Image: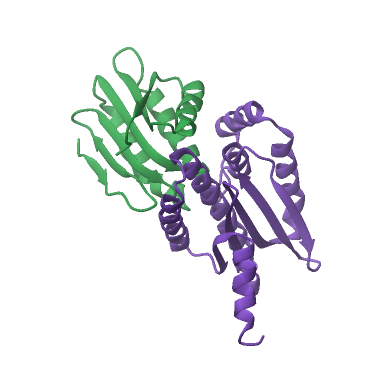
Chain colours: A purple, B green
């Protein structure tokens, strides 16, 4: 990497309307900093409260998903796969949250099922599913409620775009794009 | 009964549970990674309160944000309160939402629909 490549890197982010991004280990302090920085930026842009809250909610659940996926890698001692990427874009009045992280291939089937399900439902159906799962579904051992994607879909009011890129027999890279209109 | 208080942080709400007045208050954000851990002492306190509750218990929910893992814990909290909402003692929930925050109002309606407690969903200029 040449010294000046950092400019190309910067310009690429600028061209893509990236207002905030992070690549590295996700720690518990990171979410707070992220929300803090975004809050100031949204004030500048003049984002209304409702949209701000929706973006924040999508970020909160995205971070929760990332922590969870990283935990799985910690348990398996695959430290080099712990790093993840999160990007927030703002263009034409819409916020876009994109995440990229490694997931174990054994968890993909379940992720795809959840994602396809939320994408198949309209807002009333999502609300019904949320209520049903909140009431009936047991909590996982980690305390996660299995409601993350439902909440992301409810708050973003848009279909979730996703892709899994297979890396090897054990892992894939999970790309998720959420547009908050 | 002793009061139970927790000072809020960037990720957790301020909690004021007063066994003398019967007012149980949540103020702020509830977005910890481990909600079960955060809620455990609250639910423990509630278990003690259940044995000698006030005639009227009022819950004031003034939340700015909460994550889905907290949503399950909030439900556990309401479910516990259902037990003391009967003939001798009763429970009332005030669910606050900030002006224009229809998502938070909806969240209150979601709980109202699945919990057997009377809810009042209240719009305010600022949540705290």
Q: Is residue B6 left or right of residue A171?
A: left
* x 78%, y 62%: residue: A165
Residue at 24 percent of width and 23 percent of height:
B54
Left or right: B19 in relation to A31: left
Whether residue B59 is visible to the viewer of this picture, yes or no, is: yes
Q: Depth check: give the residue in front, B4 or A52.
A: A52
Q: How many marks?
A: 0
**Hey, which quadrant is residue B25 in on the image?**
top left
Q: Residue B93 in the image: x percent, y percent?
A: 35, 24
Residue visible at 25% across and 44% down in the picture: B5
State which quarter of the image contains the C terminus of chain B. top left
Pick the front one: B126 or B13? B126
Q: Residue at x 53, y 51 (%)?
A: A59
A62, above or below A54, in the image: below
Quadrant where the N terminus of chain B lies? Answer: top left
Q: Nearer the viewer, residue B8 or A134?
A: B8
On screen, A18 above or below A137? below
The image shows residue B29, relative to residue B98, as above or below, that is below
Residue B34: percent from the left, percent from the top? 47, 52
Q: Position of residue B99 (x, y in %)?
A: 39, 31
Q: Position of residue A181 (x, y in %)?
A: 60, 41
């Amino acid at each position: 990497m040449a010294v000046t490549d950092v400019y190309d890197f910067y310009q690429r982010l600028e061209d893509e309307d990236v207002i905030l991004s992070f690549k590295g280990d996700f720690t518990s302090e990171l979410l707070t900093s992220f929300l803090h920085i975004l809050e100031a930026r949204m004030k500048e842009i003049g984002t209304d409260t409702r949209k701000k809250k929706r973006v924040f909610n999508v970020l909160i659940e995205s971070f929760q998903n990332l922590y969870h996926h990283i935990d799985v890698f910690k348990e398996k001692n695959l430290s080099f796969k712990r790093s993840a990427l999160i990007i927030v874009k703002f263009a034409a009045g819409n916020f876009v949250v994109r995440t990229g992280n490694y997931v174990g291939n054994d968890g993909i089937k379940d992720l795809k099922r959840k994602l396809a399900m939320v994408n198949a439902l309209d807002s009333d159906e999502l609300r019904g599913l949320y209520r049903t799962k909140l009431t009936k579904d047991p909590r996982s051992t980690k305390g996660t409620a299995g409601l993350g994607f439902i909440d992301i879909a409810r708050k973003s009011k848009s279909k979730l775009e996703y892709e899994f890129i297979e890396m090897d027999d054990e892992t894939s890279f999970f790309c998720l794009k959420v547009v908050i209109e | 009964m002793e009061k139970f208080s927790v000072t809020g942080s960037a990720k957790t709400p301020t909690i004021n549970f007063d066994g003398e007045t019967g007012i149980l208050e949540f103020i702020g954000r509830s977005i910890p990674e481990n909600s079960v851990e955060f809620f455990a002492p609250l639910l423990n306190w509630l278990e003690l309160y259940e044995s000698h509750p006030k005639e009227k218990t009022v819950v004031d929910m003034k939340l700015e944000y909460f994550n889905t893992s907290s949503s399950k814990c909030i439900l556990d909290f309401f479910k516990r309160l259902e037990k003391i909402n009967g003939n001798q003692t009763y429970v009332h929930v005030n669910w606050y939402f900030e002006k224009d925050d229809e998502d938070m109002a909806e969240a209150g309606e979601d709980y109202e629909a699945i919990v057997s407690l009377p809810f009042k969903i209240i719009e305010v200029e600022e949540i705290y």
